[in-house]
Amino acid sequence: MTAQQISQVQAYLRKRFSTENLTIKPRKVQDSVEVYLDDEILGLLYIDDEDKDDISYDLNISILQVDLDEA
């Protein structure tokens, strides 16, 4: 993902989830980035850009049972 794409998606997610505490950090692989809420990783965001005219993003959030038990 490009820096511009990361910035755009981060702004969208911050607005959508009503928080400025959400950040996106690049990874070594170019097809995804890490999404953080505060200092905790929330999930991975993948880009689907096979069709350059129809780019989409997929946010994958994993929830551990132990985290649900603590909630």
Image (cartoon, rainbow, N blue to C red):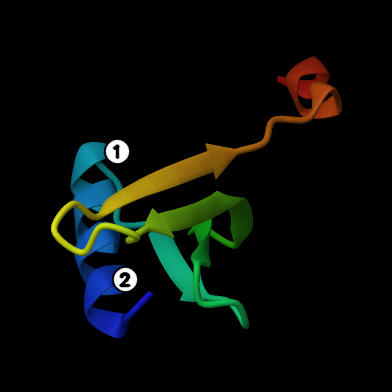
Determine the residue positioned at 51% across, 77% down.
30
| Coordinates of residue 32 in the picture (x, y in percent) | 51, 65
Q: Are marks 1 and 2 in contact (CB under 8 Å)?
A: no
Q: Above or below — where is 13 with respect to 49?
A: above
Disc 1 or disc 2, which is closer to the eye?
2
Q: Quadrant of the N terminus?
A: bottom left
Determine the residue positioned at 19% across, 65% down.
8
How crowded pointer 2 is (Cα within 10 Å; few <14, some 14-19, many 20+) is rated as some
Residue 37 in view, yes or no: no
Determine the residue positioned at 77% across, 28% down.
67
Residue 57 in view, yes or no: yes
Farthest right residue in view: 66
Mark 1 and mark 2: Cα distance apart in space: 16 Å
Q: Above or below — where is 55 with respect to 62?
A: below
| Coordinates of residue 57 in the picture (x, y in percent) | 35, 49
Q: Quadrant of the C terminus?
A: top right
Three-letter code for the amino acid on which mark 2 is drawn: Ile
The dot on residue 62 is none
The dot on residue 17 is 1
Three-letter code for the amino acid on which mark 1 is drawn: Phe
Indicate left or right for 69 with 53 as reference: right
In the foreground, 68 or 52: 52
Q: Above or below — where is 32 with respect to 4?
A: above
Indicate left or right for 55 with 45 as reference: left
Determine the residue positioned at 56% across, 53% down.
44
**Numbered circles on residues, count:** 2
Q: Secondary structure at mark 1?
A: loop
The dot on residue 6 is 2
